[in-house]
Amino acid sequence: MKGKKQKNVLRQNFLYYTMGVLILLGMKLYYRQADCDSLLWILTPTTRWVELLSGIPFTYLSGTGYVNHDMRLLIAPSCSGFRFMTIAFATLYFSFIHRIVSTRREPVSETVETVNRDSVEMGLWQTRIKGVGWIVVSVLFSWLFTVIVNGLRIIAAIYLPLYLEDTGIMGGTLTQDSLHTMIGVVVYFIALLTIYRLAGCLIQRTVNSVLTNGQNSGASETVTDTPSATGKRDFVRTFAGKCAAPVFWYFALTLGLPFLNRVKGGRMAGFQEFAMLVMGCCVLILASYFVVHFFGRRKNKSGGHVL
């Protein structure tokens, strides 16, 4: 029954999924061919955000990026966060497009005779507008979120190594490269879980508001954020549902595609260590996330409130 429902959702939204895939491929192709000047639309606001947070001034050097010669810092195209933007877009768009286009307003005062071709055409146009609108919202919001999160990551990448060097922790197995990777994974992965959670709550409230006001949606789903009280199995299933989409897109675009590219190009050296480090950080974050939700569930059962 569940599989049949998923097939119906896939069939009904096939056009929008195809559009999302094409946009995602276009973003990847754009980034592959883009130079420093072509990425100013994301590099410049990110650098200004870093300057605001840190007080460190940067100067743009054409073809190189934003530099601070005194501290020997460089915000290059590889620091733009564009890869994270593609992951955030994929997570937002593909996770919620079926809810966006399937939640529509049905006029309750119309009779069966009047709900004919005009009503059907109006519904189709409303669906198309919502689909295109969600594409625009997903792109803009993923860009804004990337600028904010990437600025925080850069700040951490500037100051955390200095702190660890002063405390004598740096060195040995914890190298500059591994620390840089860990900072990126921790900041980006937590941010992706957060953006998915916030978007899900906002969209669910919108859907519930539409349905509460007497507007029907034949294909929309009502999903609550509180785990059912039938036991640990339901809690685990609910928790997995809150993480499945961001985990899938993060691993697919952070490890999956790079793995295929490296296999194709015969450049597998160092990838295993990188993949193990990424997966290790993500597992620790998910374990912490699980513990927080587990105790939040127990608090909710005792009369507390879980966000």
Image (cartoon, rainbow, N blue to C red):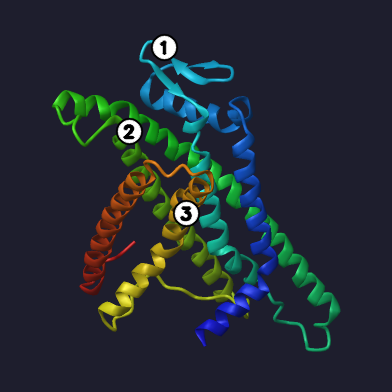
Q: Toward the viewer: 117 or 78?
A: 78
Circle 1 residue: 69
The dot on residue 236 is none
Q: Is residue 257 left or right of residue 292?
A: right
In this rendering, the answer to whether 83 lies above or below 135 is above
User: Would residue 49 appear left or right of 123 to someone viewing this image?
Assistant: left
Q: Secondary structure at mark 2?
A: helix
Element type at mark 1: loop
Please name the amino acid that badge 2 sits on: Asp
**Image point 18% across, 32% down: which residue?**
172
In which quadrant will I find the C terminus? Answer: bottom left
13 to the left or right of 110: left
| Mark-to-mark CA distance, 3 and 1 | 36 Å
Residue 177 circle label: 2
Name the residue at 62% across, 45% down. Answer: 27
271 or 100: nearer the viewer: 271
Task: Give percent across and percent down for residue 160.
Answer: 27, 30
Q: Nearer the viewer, residue 66 or 254?
A: 254
State if disc 1 and disc 2 touch (CB < 8 Å).
no
